[in-house]
Image (spheres, grey):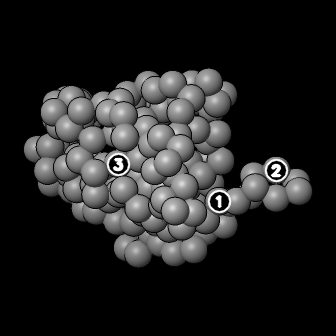
């Protein structure tokens, strides 16, 4: 696996994002971080610890798939607590096409959030989707794993962001 972003660079950027969010939401009466499962779990945990404000944490689970009519996103679960009247920061692992984050924002708005801002660890501008308010890293159009991101449900525990070679992809997919 080729390392694209080191664990040290991720930790430093997460600390910076946490400080920026803490500054921007100082005095907000009800701050809620809402992580998009499953990929955001590492980022969500580290980001929450980097924000020096009282906050709540919640989760949403969405399923995205490409169908005949384009990309469809279905809400599977969450948010589990109320976000009505809250300032919400949606925490996403990666924004590529933007369909998942668009549906998650719409869901939180329907649930009555006062505001919804997006914080993504990774953003691929080549995919054409808008970045969130808070962006960790802009990356090239490569398939990445690690720090919560997976291939065939593997590699989420890798502490850095990496790019698999073809042999690793075949092995993870059960092809040898």
Q: Quadrant of residue 148?
A: bottom left
Q: Residue furthest front?
A: 176
Instruction: Inspect this view and state whether residue 64 appears.
Output: yes
Residue 147 spot, x, y in % from top left? 31, 49
Q: CA distance from mark 1 to mark 2?
A: 10 Å
Q: Give the label on residue 146, or none.
A: 3
Q: Residues within 10 Å of mark 3 (few under 14, many from 20)?
A: many
**Vertically, is 82 above or below 102?**
below
Secondary structure, mark 2, is: strand
Q: Quadrant of the N terminus?
A: top left
Secondary structure, mark 3, is: loop
Residue 167 spot, x, y in % from top left? 49, 48
Residue at the (65%, 47%) spot, across then down: 99
Whichever of labels 3 and 1 marks the residue nearer the N terminus, that label is 1
**Vertically, is 14 above or below 65?**
above
Q: Are marks 3 and 1 in contact (CB under 8 Å)?
A: no
**Vertically, is 79 above or below 32?**
below
Residue at the (24%, 33%) spot, across then down: 6
Q: Nearer the viewer, residue 92 or 26?
A: 92
Whichever of labels 2 and 3 marks the residue nearer the N terminus, that label is 2
Q: Give the label on residue 64, or none.
A: 1
Q: Residue furthest left?
A: 52
**3 vs 1, front mark:** 3
Q: CA distance from mark 2 to mark 3?
A: 27 Å
Residue 151 spot, x, y in % from top left? 49, 56
Q: Are marks 1 and 2 in contact (CB under 8 Å)?
A: no
What residue sits right under mark 2 in the picture?
A: 70
């Amino acid at each position: 696996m080729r390392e694209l972003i080191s664990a040290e660079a991720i930790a430093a950027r997460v600390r910076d994002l946490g400080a920026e969010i803490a500054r921007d939401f100082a005095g907000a009466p009800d701050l809620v971080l809402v992580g998009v499962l499953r990929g955001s779990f590492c980022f969500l945990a580290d980001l929450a610890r980097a924000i020096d404000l009282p906050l709540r944490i919640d989760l949403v689970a969405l399923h995205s798939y490409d169908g005949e009519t384009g990309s469809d996103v279905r809400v599977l679960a969450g948010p589990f607590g109320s976000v009505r009247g809250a300032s919400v920061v949606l925490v996403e692992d990666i924004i590529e096409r933007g369909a998942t984050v668009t549906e998650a924002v719409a869901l939180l708005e329907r649930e009555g959030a006062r505001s919804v801002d997006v914080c993504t660890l990774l953003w691929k501008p080549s995919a054409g989707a808008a970045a969130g308010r808070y962006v960790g890293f802009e990356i090239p159009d490569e398939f990445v794993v690690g720090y919560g991101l997976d291939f065939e449900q593997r590699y989420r525990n890798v502490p850095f962001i990496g790019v698999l070679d073809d042999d690793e992809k075949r092995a993870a997919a059960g092809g040898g």
